[in-house]
Image (spheres, grey):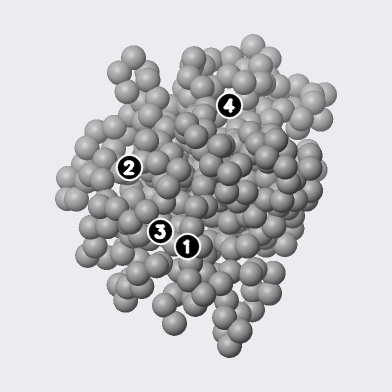
Amino acid sequence: MTIWVIEPHDPLIMRDGRPFNPTPGARAVSLPFPLPSTVIGALRTRAGSDANGNFDQTRVLDMLTQAMHGPFLVEIGQDDQLAWLMPAPADALITKDDSRCRPLVPFTICPDEQTDLQQLAMLVAPEDPTPAKVDPQAVRFWRWSHFSAWLMQPKAMPIPTDLGIGELLINKRVHVRVSAESQTADEGGLFITHGLEFTTEKQGYSLAVKRLGLALATDAAIQPGLGTLGGERRMIAWRSTTAQLPQPPDRLIDMIVEQQQCRVVLLTPAMFTEGYRPTQLLQPLDGVVPELMAAAVGRPQIATGWDYQKNEAKPSRRLAPAGSVYWLKLAGSPAAIRAWAKKQWMNSISDDDQSNRDGFGLAVLGTWNQFGSQTTGGT
């Protein structure tokens, strides 16, 4: 696969599905990060268009088979080098007024404890319970060096100063509605759009200039150059790179084989037919039988959109958000587990093939080298 970088020239509007039109007081609110469906739509449109930018309608079915890994947030450095930024793992707890990051670990449910999560044998909690609330300003995207270390061994640690970046800044713009007849501004016809800013990062009370972009991997035949993405067709630039997707850290696969268990961390939102619980991932595959023991899943993310093939709105879908973590036990021979782990690295684990081709449910693996005590959360 080739790695492509999308560098926005303007703030990107990634609509959240709420109705919007240029009426006085209307607001177009953006999602905190682009959904894979938005990016794969732009990719397929570009791959299926001719030199003049006209899409070939006869290639619709062919374009739906084109697959993508991503999108990822990247920082673009000198000589266009990429620094990968991954969604913060849900098993990393950062609380207010705290300088440490604590791991969440599975705990066995005691006989006198009850939960409505009947399909899970264990619940997750910090080993050292704290009454502090989760920090809403915590880093949302971790640099690969810290993320890969967390995959290898999640442990309590001081929060590194270069852990990553927070949420993308929101660029708010006020627009005026223009009369179609007179081509002049309508009195009182003001509306607001919110766009994702890819050039700055908030650091305390100051702003640091960054070159941020989106990266994806695909085999689709697309051309470099200028294009558009999202609401209002904001301008972006496409270009290919010689970069490669991040590979498993040294010894990670060996440790998963030795422990016969692992964590699965989502890099993009996933579509599961049973809500938070994956189905395809838990199917026996090549001599390995995975068993879901515990899960740390954030609030569901809602995906909507417009089906240009059917010319109608797509049904809303509830997605397991990026950063969600699943703890699995693996039954099988060492050779089978090794092959299974290699196959699941940077593989999409959504429950249907089209969602996987669209980039939903991209995942990596981490070690699970400890069990919690026989009580949950220190009870």
Question: Which residue in the structure is indicated by mark 3?
Answer: 103
Q: Is residue 114 in view from this perspective? A: yes
Residue under the image location 44 percent in, 62 percent down: 104
Q: Are marks 1 and 3 in contact (CB under 8 Å)?
A: yes
Quarter holding the N terminus is: top right
Q: Camera-side residue: 117 or 194? A: 117
Distance of label 1 from label 2 (alpha carbons): 23 Å
Whether residue 224 sits left or right of residue 168 in the image: it is right
Disc number lying in front (1 or 2): 1
Q: Secondary structure at mark 2?
A: strand
Q: Secondary structure at mark 4?
A: strand
Q: Residue 217 shows which numbered tag?
A: 4
Picture coordinates of residue 310, whole percent (x, y): 80, 43
Question: Which residue in the structure is indicated by mark 2?
Answer: 164
Indicate the amino acid at tag 3: Pro
Distance of label 1 from label 3 (alpha carbons): 6 Å
Q: Are marks 4 and 1 in contact (CB under 8 Å)?
A: no
Residue under the image location 48 percent in, 19 percent down: 243
Q: First in sequence: mark 3 or mark 2?
A: 3
Disc number lying in front (3 or 4): 3
